[in-house]
Every structure is written in C-alpha cells, then in structure tokens.
Image (spheres, rainbow, N blue to C red):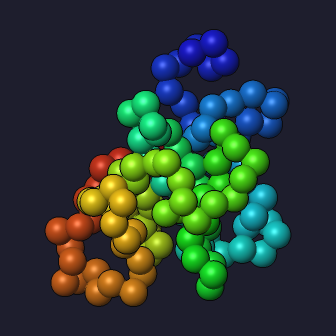
Amino acid sequence: MEHWSLAERWNYPDDGYGDCEDYVLLKRRMLMQAGWSREALLITVVRDEYGDGHTNLTVKTDKGEFILDNQTDDILLWSDTRYRFVERQSQADPNVWVSLGNPRGAPITAAIDHRRHRSNFRRARVWPR
C-alpha cells in the first residue's frame, strides 16, 4: 500500500522496493535472461508457519524442485521448507494455476497427463495481475 498506493500490485521491483510477488517476478526474469526455460520457473503460492500467504519461485531441476524465497538466502528443496504449498503456475500455461492439494504431498509435475487430471487444474487468476 505504501509503495503503489494499492493493496496488491505485481510489478518488477526496479526501484528497489517490492513485496514477495515483485521479487519472484525479478528472479524469474533474471533466470530466464540467464537461459532458464519458463517451464522450469514456476511462481508458487504458499502459507508460511504463521498461516500467512506468501509467494516464492519453484525452480525445477534434474536434482529436484528448489524454492527461491526472498525471506532467506538458503535455497532449499520444497520438502525442506516450512511452507504449506497451495498452488503454482502450470508448466504448460503460465495463466493456469495448479492446486497442490495435500500441502506436504508431492507437487504436481508436467509428467501428469493433464487430460486425465483436469480436475486438478483451475483458472484461479490470470498472472500477472
């Protein structure tokens, strides 16, 4: 509210200020400029240990799925964080958000046949806002 005079706005923190969504956008842009594919960089909505909503970046690699988070310098496997995972961008379409269901279960990956699991997908919102 202090920065944009709006309750919520997703924008790059080009002026050095922003919240978790803004820093996710910046990390994602920088990694894509460094050669990472969009499909490997998924914006993810979580609940922190206090139950508050938070956004971070899931980076899918051949070594696992890692969380880049503006609240820590550590890069952790998603399963080593304290977060409850709510939803994240679909690898196939960044405008589709995938419900992650069981907060500590294995996250949905591109290996799932999306036609058979259409109930796992919902158009919760269009990204970015």
Residue plotted at (50% across, 27% down): 8
Closer-to-camera residue (38/87): 87
Residue plotted at (23% across, 67% down): 120
Query: What is the x, y in percent for residue 5?
Result: 58, 14
State the image quarter where residue 66 is shown: bottom right
Query: What is the x, y in percent for residue 49?
Result: 45, 37
Residue plotted at (17% across, 68% down): 119
Closer-to-camera residue (50/69): 50
State the image quarter where residue 72 is shown: top right
**Residue 22: in sight, yes or no?**
yes
Q: How many marks?
A: 0
In the image: residue 3, left or right of residue 39:
right
Closer-to-camera residue (89/62): 62
In this picture, is 70 found above or below 74? above
In the image: residue 108, left or right of residue 19:
left
**Residue 95: in sight, yes or no?**
no
In this picture, is 115 found above or below 68? below
Q: Quadrant of the N terminus?
A: top right
In the image: residue 69, left or right of residue 46:
right
In this picture, is 104 found above or below 9? below
Query: What is the x, y in percent for residue 40?
Result: 59, 73
Closer-to-camera residue (21/51): 51
